[in-house]
Image: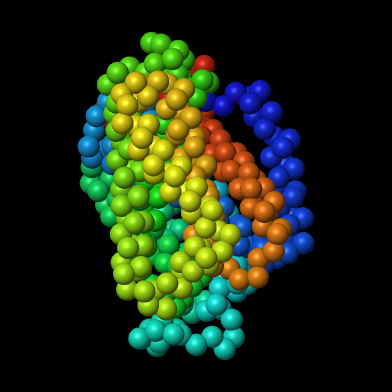
């Protein structure tokens, strides 16, 4: 995935304004700022970790479908150090709006002692540092090695599930769901794959310029990408529906505590948008072979799934934070824009290889691994 100087210059001004607006938001309402920071960071973390997981998955499965996507995923994973640096404000957020960080909080569960110990701010901080260390360690390991990829996928599944519980689910500590970690994995894998497809089909990308047709993808490649997108959409929808169905059938106060602020307030319209735009519309479109082979149509759908991935991150975080004002309406997209810009710049710095790994024309000379 290439980045032209003109493109960098065009985005620099608005991005720096977004970063400045984030500083203003911190002064205006610290609670809203940290809540929107959590929503934006979780979306970005899902994209970066999902890209890494899809890269490992292709290492294990192989196939020509992943060859054009691997450079995109490597570019996204290169932003891992910046992503982990942007995680630091969450350590301050842990003492801002999480119920378990407030003085006098009493666990409301069958095992209050375990919950109080597990959600103690110090232990949560230690676990977040451990997750970050493991993510960075495995991002630095060489790819194209099946042992590394298999171990990486296992570590990814465990740590992302635990991070989802610590950072998102614990916003409503009396609520628990054994499927929430799986739902976070499905969201991350779907977002990482959609981001890879959208970037690979960008008109400025190497694959798009070398394509046989400006409008249509090679038949097999289009079908593969479309079918895999459909698979991720169905997996994500299935996990979300099963979790909702079980909780709806039980109809217990502790179980529905997470859904009440999302389905009985104005947030319900965002839920409708996620269901229609994130499931029914992709399901309808990706059933048609002509759509999957149409370059622009598939790219627009992939971009829409990326946007819906951020909206889902907003939906699973902000309704659980009490006392949010209207400032969240403008602060959430600005923080996402600023964070995306910082990740983009951070990835560019990491990809600036030393001279020994660069060809005279500026292209990387260090190979990723054995094909």
Give the colour scheme shown. Answer: rainbow
Q: Residue furthest top?
A: 212
Q: Residue at x 28, y 45 (%)?
A: 149
Up/down of 267 relative to 171, above or below:
above
In the picture shown, does residue 31 fall above or below 292?
Answer: below
Q: At which x and y percent is residue 10?
A: 69, 28
Tag count: 0
The answer to whether residue 124 is visible is: no
Q: Residue at x 77, y 62 (%)?
A: 28
For residue 101, say whether it is visible.
Answer: yes
> Residue 326 sits in which quadrant?
bottom right
Q: Position of 360 compared to 19: left or right? A: left
Q: Which one is in front, 96 or 62? A: 96
Q: Position of residue 56 (x, y in %)?
A: 31, 42
Would residue 178 appear left or right of 363 to someone viewing this image?
left
Please tell me which residue is depicted at 61% across the width and 48% down the height of the picture: 336
Q: Return the residue nearer the eye: 295 or 164.
A: 295
Q: Is residue 185 left or right of residue 167?
A: left
Q: Nearer the viewer, residue 305 or 195?
A: 305
Residue 6 at what x, y percent from top left? Answer: 66, 23
Give x and y (percent) for residue 7.
63, 26
Q: Is residue 353 above or below residue 276?
A: above
């Amino acid at each position: 995935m290439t980045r032209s100087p003109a493109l960098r210059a065009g985005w620099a001004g608005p991005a720096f304004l977004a970063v400045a607006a984030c500083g203003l938001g911190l002064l205006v309402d610290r609670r809203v700022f940290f809540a929107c920071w959590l929503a934006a960071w979780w979306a970005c973390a899902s994209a970066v970790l999902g890209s890494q997981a899809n890269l490992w998955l292709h290492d294990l499965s192989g196939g020509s479908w992943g060859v054009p996507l691997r450079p995109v995923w490597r570019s996204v994973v290169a932003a891992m150090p910046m992503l982990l640096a942007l995680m630091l404000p969450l350590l301050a957020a842990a003492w801002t709006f999480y119920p378990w960080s407030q003085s006098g909080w009493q666990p409301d569960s069958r095992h209050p002692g375990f919950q109080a110990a597990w959600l103690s701010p110090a232990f949560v901080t230690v676990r977040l540092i451990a997750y970050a260390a493991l993510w960075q360690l495995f991002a630095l390991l060489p790819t194209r090695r099946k042992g590394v990829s298999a171990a990486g996928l296992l570590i990814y599944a465990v740590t992302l599930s635990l991070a989802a519980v610590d950072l998102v689910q614990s916003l409503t500590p009396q609520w628990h769901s054994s499927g929430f970690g799986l739902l976070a994995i499905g969201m991350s894998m779907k977002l990482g794959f959609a981001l890879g497809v959208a970037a690979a089909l960008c008109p400025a990308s190497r694959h798009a310029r070398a394509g046989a047709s400006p409008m249509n993808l090679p038949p097999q490649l289009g079908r593969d990408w479309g079918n895999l997108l459909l698979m991720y959409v169905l997996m994500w929808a299935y996990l979300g529906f099963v979790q909702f169905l079980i909780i709806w059938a039980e109809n217990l106060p502790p179980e529905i505590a997470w859904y009440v602020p999302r389905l009985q307030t104005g947030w319900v319209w965002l839920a409708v948008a996620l269901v229609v735009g994130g499931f029914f519309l992709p399901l309808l479109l990706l059933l048609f072979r002509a759509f999957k082979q149409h370059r622009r149509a598939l790219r627009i759908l992939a971009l829409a799934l990326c946007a819906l991935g951020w909206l889902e991150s907003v939906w699973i975080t902000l309704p659980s934070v009490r006392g949010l004002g209207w400032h969240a309406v403008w602060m959430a997209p600005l923080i996402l824009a600023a964070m995306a810009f910082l990740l983009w710049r951070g990835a560019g710095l990491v990809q600036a290889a030393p001279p020994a790994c660069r060809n005279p024309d500026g292209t990387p000379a260090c190979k990723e691994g054995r094909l």
